[in-house]
Amino acid sequence: MSEQDALRAYDGLLASIGNRADAIGPGRLASHWPHIGRNYGRLVIAGQALQGWDPAVAGSRWHATDARTSAGRATIIERTQTWFAEADDPVGVIATLTNRQGSPFWTLCHDVALALEPGAGGPWYSRFAWTNVYPVAADEPRDSPRGPLKEAQDPFVGGLFAALLDMLDAERVVIVSGPAYWWHPARTPAFAWLSPATFPLMRAGRVDGRTIVVGYHPTYARRRRIGADAYAARIVETIASLERGAR
């Protein structure tokens, strides 16, 4: 698939949001397109969902009614793809924010990126592409999508995510998307054959030549006394085992 396939999938997701604009309501929404680190080495790390944009960043912000027309959706996509384009490092725009540094998700990203891309050079956040399974969220207040906004995206997130991985030519994919409420809609059809894995992971396997692990958010792992170091080590070990088995 090319970027055009991903764009078509994104447009379909936005159209679904536009169709449910009345139920979603008038609040401002935020949208995400993959941020690709300057030293990207085909490692993709994905969160379960965007949670709006911090006030400190420009972001891409709009209303559900804007997605009702093809022209409106084209404008949303253009803004979503380009607002961070002039940054020294697209991932660093978020990862270096004071309120993000040291958070459970970005700590896990730090540890995984250093472990899986040791020779990439540059800061840790330059070594991977960051995306989200659910790319559109409420911006006011900032939160993961729920209710009609999540339901509008449910039928599209699996196909869009698969198209984005193809666009990025991903080789290793770490998806932090638990509990299963967030991952289940994305499982079929592209990722249906991933096998169950031991907590804090949920699923793992090889799909289309890629190594993919799906795990719980590190906040849930901490509740079971699995710290960031141990979680990152589990991810790295699982990926190594899968890749040994593929040789």
Image: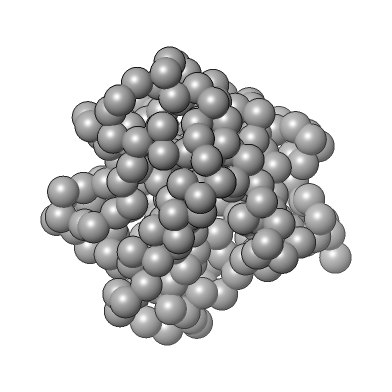
Location of residue 145 by image quarter: top left
Measuring from the top left, give residue 209's x and y in whole percent: 80, 60
Measured as percent of width and height from the top left, residue 78 is found at: 45, 60
Q: Is residue 177 left or right of residue 103?
A: right
The percent coordinates of residue 88 (x first, y second) are 30, 79
Where, quadrant-wise, is the C terminus in this rendering?
bottom right
114 displayed left or right of 89:
right
Q: Specify the quadrant that holds the N terminus.
A: bottom right
Residue 246 vertical position relative to residue 22 in the rendered view, above or below: below
Q: Does residue 121 lie above or below 23 as drawn?
A: below
The residue lying toward the viewer, choosing from 44 and 152, is 152
Q: Is 113 left, or right, of 61 in this rendering?
A: right
Which residue shows up at 63% across the image and 40% down it? Answer: 12
In x, y percent, where is residue 194?
75, 38
Residue 66 vs 115, above or below: the answer is above
Residue plotted at (64% across, 35% down): 156
| Residue depicted at x 65% and y 47% | 9
Which is nearer the eye, 75 or 103? 75
Q: Is residue 224 visible?
A: no
Q: Residue furthest right?
A: 247
Can residue 83 be spotted in the picture? yes
Residue at the spot x=32%, y=77% of the render? 86
Where 16 falls versus 100 (above or below)? above
Colour scheme of the rendered structure: one colour
Number of numbered labels in the structure image: 0
Q: Is residue 12 left or right of residue 151?
A: right
